[in-house]
Image (cartoon, helix red, strand yellow):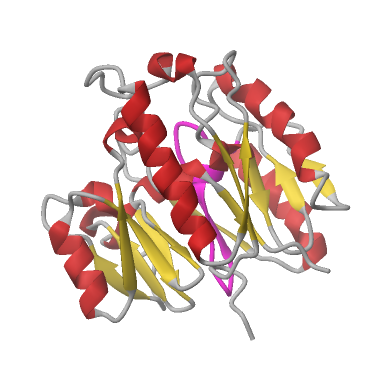
Amino acid sequence: MAAMSHTFTHAITRAPGISVTKGLRAVDTGAPDLERFRAHHQDYVEVLRSTGAKVTVLEPLEDYPDAVFVEDTALCLPEGAIVMRPGAPSRLGEAAAMAPVLRKFYGDVLAIEGPGFIEGGDILTTEREILVGRSARTDGAGIEELRGLVSRWGYAVREVETPEGVLHFKTDCSLVDEETILATERLAASGCFEGYRVILTGEGEEAAANSIRFNDLMLVPAGFPKTAERLSNAGYEIREIGNSEAARLDGGMSCLSLRFSPAK
């Protein structure tokens, strides 16, 4: 039986717009190069498609510079989708714009109404539970509302803490398979992955933790050879994708797509 946490028939992405150079960032390392960003994004889409998945590429939303990072707008499960309520006020319109797109794939599209906040980058779905990291973008009220919504489909939510100074929970971790998580040492040391096998990122390669398992492939940001080698040695098929421009906006592999398999 296919693992719902990393086996997908569909993905949704959004092409980076001209306004992406004005996107939010924790540390200003300079504006991303738009053409290079577009090239990296195209490579990303092609790798997703190479697995046989149907990938929808949405047009840019120029009014929302961060709209390329579609993962924060929704949680997609086989039974239905839940539109998030981003903790960055400038991103609320992105979530609203994603709702009608999701209705093309799902009969059941719910939404976080508030007053709490929650972003998809703080949510890691495994085969046994949904881990949600409390962060600057996701608060306790948002997590509780999510817990209530997914309970109808039989999912358990476990709240965990995102390390201080880390934007999203999944900045520091990603799912590798049913029992395995790739994580930074600082996050793994918290004990939040007890019961899972953990592969640590290479020393100085914490940014590689935001990778994604998509069907038979592990998509890893380029430029982190020690982490890629650890994953390869563990038996996973690696695809390295340029991520230098998304990284200027605190973005990684998971941020760039919504990945799902709607139940028939």
> What's the residue at 34%, 73% (across, down)?
237
Position of residue 221 in the picture relative to residue 143 (left or right): left
Task: Residue 195 in the image: state x and y as whole percent.
Answer: 41, 78
Position of residue 221 in the picture relative to residue 230 (left or right): right
> What's the residue at 41%, 20% (across, down)?
24
Does residue 18 lie above or below 253 as drawn? above
Task: Residue 65 in the image: state x and y as whole percent.
Answer: 50, 19
Task: Residue 99 in the image: state x and y as whole percent.
Answer: 76, 36
Numbered circles on residues, count: 0
Q: Which residues are magenta?
A: 118-137
Is residue 251 visible in the rendered structure shown here? no
Position of residue 100 in the picture relative to residue 224 (left or right): right
- Give the quadrant of residue 10: bottom right
- Quadrant containing the N terminus is bottom right
Q: Is residue 135 magenta?
A: yes
> What's the residue at 83%, 69% (across, down)?
264
Task: Residue 210 in the image: state x and y as whole percent.
Answer: 35, 51
Residue nearest the viewer, comparing 220 with 50: 50
Does residue 106 lie above or below 141 as drawn? below
- Give the quadrant of residue 150: bottom right
